[in-house]
Amino acid sequence: MKAPAWKAPARILSALCAALAWCAAAEPQEPAQLPVVAQDLKQLQMPGKVEAVLWTRRSDRCTLQLVYPNQGRGGYFIGNTITNLRGLDPTFGARTLALTDGRSVLNDETQPAATRAPVEVRNTAAPAEPKKWTAPAIQAWLLRPDGTIIMPLASATPTSGPGDTVPRESLFSFPLSATREASAVAVNIDGEYRVQKLEPFAD
């Protein structure tokens, strides 16, 4: 016995709804975004060249940051100026140097005190030129447990701000898979090699 004609569209509609529900369930879900976590690699620091090293897992990559010293605080060496007092040493004559009311007075025992004229003492040595700081030459890579190397995808040397020419760090980017594959970080800072073991990230 044939099914009533009005029931056929209902069966088709029910089948379509079931298919759509199955497709929605089978569609891959967006992975949860990983939290940003970092490790402080103190063994890779180098006084005067690299003051901090951070190994960071981000949402889409891993980064290795080698932070340079802050050049705004004591980054330059300033020499002392020296006052030239030649000819005023009592060892080589009768004259001595005294200060009166903030001014230097040339004393000569052979002259009355009233005739001793104040003289100015000036710095004759030019101030030393500031020692310019230069960023170290840095290479960085990761090591797997079997000794093979993971090279960075990219590197950069960001500056502190607009118009600044002094770099603040060396930044190396690695694939996110490096958090599972890498067991250590190796760096070369001005020809000196250093290696530090990596610990698993704790979420």
Image (cartoon, rainbow, N blue to C red):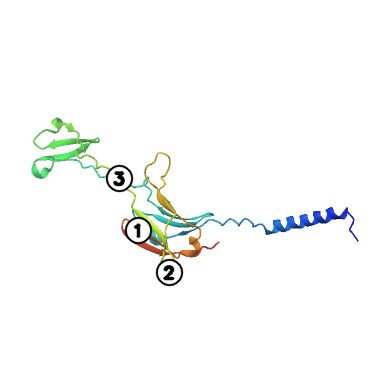
Circles 2 and 3: CB atoms closer than 8 Å: no
Residue 51's image quarter?
bottom left
Q: Residue at x 38, y 63 (%)?
A: 195
From the top left corner, tell me how far across and down residue 35 is, in percent.
56, 56
Whichever of labels 1 and 2 marks the residue nearer the N terminus, that label is 2
Q: Residue furthest bottom?
A: 146
Q: Residues within 10 Å of mark 2 (few under 14, many from 20)?
A: few
Q: Amino acid at mark 1?
A: Asn
Above or below, comparing residue 70 to residue 178 in the picture: above
Q: Earlier in the sequence, mark 1 or mark 3?
A: 3
Q: Residues within 10 Å of mark 3 (few under 14, many from 20)?
A: few
Q: Residue at x 26, y 42 (%)?
A: 129
Q: Where's residue 111, x and y in %? A: 10, 33
Q: Amino acid at mark 3?
A: Lys
Q: Is residue 180 above or below residue 118?
A: below
**Amino acid at the residue labelled 2:** Asp
The answer to which of 86 and 103 lies nearer the viewer is: 86
User: Going by the image, does 156 lie left or right of 179?
Assistant: left
Q: How far from the left and from the top, in percent, is residue 105?
A: 18, 35
Which disc, if any, is residue 188? 1
Furthest residue in direction front, as rendered: 1
Secondary structure of the residue carrying numbered label 1: strand
| Label 1 vs label 3, nearer the camera | 1
Q: Nearer the viewer, mark 2 or mark 3?
A: 2
- Mark 1–mark 2 CB contact (< 8 Å): no
Based on the displayed image, in which of its 4 quarters is residue 144 positioned? bottom left
Which mark, by number, is residue 132?
Answer: 3
Indicate the quadrant containing the N terminus: top left, top right, bottom left or bottom right. Answer: bottom right
Q: Earlier in the sequence, mark 2 or mark 3?
A: 3
Residue occupied by mark 2: 146
Q: Furthest-right residue in view?
A: 1
